[in-house]
Image (spheres, grey):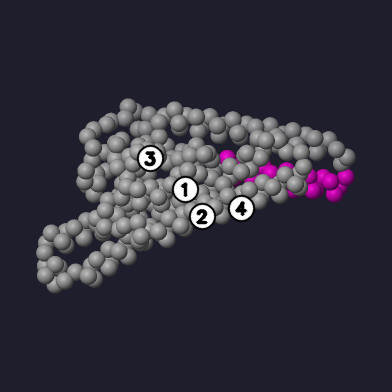
Amino acid sequence: MWSCFKQYWLPHHRSVIIENTSSFSPDDIIEYNRIEEDLQAILRPLNFMENIFLCAKYSIRRQYITSNSRIYNFFRVFCIILNRCFHTNQIIDWNITVWNERNTTLHFYSTLCVSISGFIGYMLYLTGDSVSTVSNIVLSRYNILLALKIQCALSSLRINRSQVTGIIICSWCCVIISNIYSISWVIFYCCYYGNINIVTIVTAYASISYEISVAYAFILIKLTDKLLQQWINECRALSLEDSENVENVDKLFIVYCDIQEIYMIIEKTFQHLVSFEPS
């Protein structure tokens, strides 16, 4: 991962538009690669939520997918550092205030438990933010490759909007349920603790980005399962004459290789996020 991170800071190499996505590597990823509306509809709610909290894996504008700019990544890192500095200051102030109060045995142990749990929570969120940011920067080319591979498979298997409507609905449901859960938690937090500043409220709501990362992986796996099922149906629908046609067999084999690679890229790009997210 460190070698990929160092490579990121080298000048980006741009070449011509890639037409055959089944034969290129992450180093060949360039700007101006087309993503059709059906795939955009699936990714739109998830990308929208990630853009709110500056943790988007890529940018899709006018049906073309591009990598995030370095300014975007720098600003993301700056916001995380600023936010965690604010949290550190809050934890220190709270501990100083509480430990200076009347010190009884019960108060000591309860305060100690709260302090330890607060520190553990802080470290979990710090780890989650760090893993998410580093993964998005280091694996940005793989994230774009993943979207292009899925688009290639959708086009090759001729999957239309009606066939992915369920996944689109599922994507929106994941985002809506995550928002309901996070907003409910913020309301409970405000009602229980009373005097809460706006920065704490925004930070508490921003924890939804962890749920969105898990939902993103879930939707992509669900979509890839759909691709694999469609590929199986196409194989079963082949007539004896078609199965003896080398061109048809090669086409199906290429699609299968793409689907297999999609699974591998999902594992590569999401395993750290799903493993370390504090949610």
- The mark that comes first in sequence, 3 or 1, is 1
Q: Secondary structure at mark 4?
A: helix
Q: Mark 3 is on which residue type?
A: Ile
Q: CA distance from mark 3 to mark 1?
A: 12 Å
Q: Which residues are magenta?
A: 104-126
Q: Are marks 4 and 3 in contact (CB under 8 Å)?
A: no
Which of the two labelled residues, at mark 2 and mark 1, occupies the earlier sequence position?
1
Give the label on residue 181, or none: 4
| Res 128 → quadrant | top right
Q: How far apart are labels 4 and 1 at the CA level?
A: 16 Å
Q: What residue sits 38% from the left and 40% below the top?
A: 60
Q: Do labels 2 and 4 touch, CB within 8 Å? A: no
Which numbered dot is residue 174? 2
The local secondary structure at tag 3 comes to: strand
Image position of 142 (left or right of 54) = left
Q: Which mark is residue 60?
A: 3
Q: Residues within 10 Å of mark 1 (few under 14, many from 20)?
A: many
C-alpha distance separating marks 3 and 2? 20 Å
Residue 267 circle label: none
Q: Main secondary structure of the magenta part?
A: helix
Q: Does 116 lie within the magenta span?
A: yes
Q: How far separated are the C-alphas under marks 4 and 3?
A: 27 Å
Sequence-first tag of 4 and 3: 3
